[in-house]
Image (cartoon, rainbow, N blue to C red):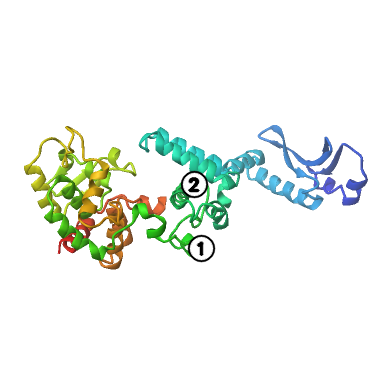
Amino acid sequence: MGSHTRNVLTVKSIATSKSVKLRDGGGLYLVSKGSGRYWILNYTFAGLRREIGLGPLHTVGLADAREKAEIARKLIRQGIDPLAAKREAEEATPKAITFGAYADDFIDAAVKAGRWRGAKTEARWRNLLEVHAKPIRAKVISSIKVKDVLEVLRPVWGSKQETAEKLREAIERVLSAATVEGHRTGTNPATWKDVLSHVLHKPDELTNRNHHAAMPHADVPALMKKLAEGDGVSARALELTVLTGVRSGEARGAVWPEIDLQTKVWTIPAVRMKGGKEHRVPLSDQAVVLLKVMKAQRVNDFVFPGVRDKKPLSDASLGKALTGAGGGAYTVHGFRSSFRDWATEVAHAPREIAEAALAHAVGDAVERSYARSDALERRRTLMQDWAKYCCG
């Protein structure tokens, strides 16, 4: 590679030459392939002749090609093969993956891991991420911004609110997982708190979601007093539902082996939880008293046995108990909201403790990985205060 034969070409000589291969010196050539012209560098490494492409003439000019060739020669002098270095760099750069491809993989992985209960959950996720999230499926996952998420949410926000909220949550979880796996960086554009809450407004809970209408927490003590006066298994089941903040199905399906009155903990197994994760419920003194009453009249494994043998209470039974106690304008599920509002407005409980009490997955994947403990004792204090408020 004698330096005296370097830099033979000029921009003009390249433009006027029809030659298939032009030599610039030092192993640098401009070759014609098809209708394009490309820079290559011939070199010898470890006794073997090699060739590396430096790019097409239309994007890499003469000066750029010489600079790239010089970088490669420098590597050779350091005992590094430029071709191997180039391959390594390409492998280190993550492939641009689309939202659609990543979302499909995310669902497949969840199904394979048995993370969801039944095919219904999988079908719902596929519908949300294939049909509703269609406008962003072809976009590279690292490039998705708030405006892209809004484009997907706005058509259903306010009209199909429940779908819209599940869709937002699904997109948030997919983007969180992509962040953890290194496919994106920065704030999750589908997060509600501090991001979408500024631009989307939740429709009025009572008018648009009357099926989850929540009793104001200030009215709960009067209702609990009425329930305590009534007898019947449904009234007891509703009392426990209110005291513990669980979903009505979780209370109705409770069996005695789940309940430990010594440690005052009710462990609901993953298969009975909406989120598919075991949930430990700290039992307040009031809840323990109620459960002891039920245990004294135990007929089978169900804490709240139904009318039919070996069956739990029916779905409608708690609603009837609520109506009977004068709460007909509200729903059983709404008591979770009553508790949540009380936790914020009255107890000033930290968000993650209040959310954990309702078995809600808190924050993004990163935040959740730091919050592995279910904070049982901190929740116990909160649930005891709530029980005191309800029965005070």
359 sits left or right of 17 in the view = left
- In the picture, the quarter occupied by the N terminus is top right
Does the residue at mark 2 contact the one at mark 1 (Cβ under 8 Å)?
A: no
78 or 338, nearer to the observer: 338
Label 2 is placed on what type of residue?
A: Ala
Badge 1 element: loop
Say if residue 74 shows up in the picture. Answer: yes
Q: Answer left or right for 289 relative to 335.
A: left
Q: Name the quadrant containing residue 117.
A: top left
Q: Earlier in the sequence, mark 2 or mark 1?
A: 2
Residue 4: which numbered mark, if any? none
Q: Residues within 10 Å of mark 2 (few under 14, many from 20)?
A: many
- Amino acid marked by disc 1: Val
Relative horizontal placement of residue 290, taking residue 184 as reference (left or right)? left
Image quadrant for the C terminus? Answer: bottom left
Give the crowd class for mark 1: few <14, some 14-19, many >=20 residues within 10 Å: few
In the picture of the structure, the residue carrying the numbered disc 2 is: 178
Residue 124 percent coordinates (x, y): 44, 40
Q: Residue at x 16, y 55 (%)?
A: 227
Tell me, yes or no, if residue 140 can be seen here: no
Question: Residue 193, image x and y in percent?
Answer: 43, 60
Among the 4 quarters of the image, the one containing residue 224: bottom left
Q: Secondary structure at mark 2?
A: helix
Q: Which mark is residue 199?
A: 1
